Amino acid sequence: MQRGSSQATNIILKSDNLEIVKILRKTKSEMFENLKVGDTIILSIEVKCAGSNKGTYASYIKAENLGTGECNYKSFNQINGILSCFEFKN
């Protein structure tokens, strides 16, 4: 898409598939609380403006359990603490 074009382009950034190999501590965060060793998740975020003239808003990352299809959205600040509850396969 060229600059100034009115055509919409969807750009989605995605992680690799993240397989859980160990649960380091429990979380009560929706969707993440149900994850078990062996489950695989993927993280994705749409590239788009996150703020406005009235202030800055957080960007939200979609976390999806590939086995169940269950999804949840967390901000960059929130997801860092949640992911530290798990060990993932390299």
Image (spheres, rainbow, N blue to C red):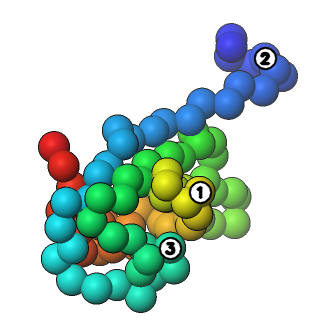
Q: x and y percent of residue 72 in the render?
A: 56, 67
Say if 24 sits above or below 59 in the image. Answer: below
Q: Is residue 8 above or below residue 22?
A: above
Question: Measured from the top left, where is residue 43 in percent x and y?
Answer: 44, 50
Tag 3: residue type? Answer: Met
Asked where in the image residue 11 lies, by quadrant, the reply is top right
Residue marked by disc 2: 5
Q: Nearer the viewer, mark 1 or mark 2?
A: 1
Residue on which the image places disc 3: 31
Q: Quadrant of residue 27?
A: bottom left
The image shows residue 70 at horizontal and vertical percentages of: 58, 63
**45, above or below 21, in the image:** above
- Residue labelled with disc 1: 69
Q: Secondary structure at mark 3?
A: loop
Q: Nearer the viewer, residue 2 or 41?
A: 41
Please name the amino acid that badge 2 sits on.
Ser
Q: Is residue 23 left or right of residue 16?
A: left
* Closer to viewer: mark 2 or mark 3: 3
Pointer 1 or 3: first along the chain: 3
Please state, as top left, top right, bottom left or bottom right, where the N terminus lies in the image. top right
- Taking depth in this image into account, of 10 and 16 the one nearest to the observer is 16
Residue 13 in view: yes
Mark 1 vs mark 3, foreground winner is 1
Mark 1–mark 2 contact, CB under 8 Å?
no
Q: Amino acid at mark 1?
A: Gly
Label 2 crowd (10 A; few <14 / some 14-19 / many >=20):
few
Label 1: state its secondary structure: loop
Gap between marks 1 and 3 measured at Cα: 10 Å
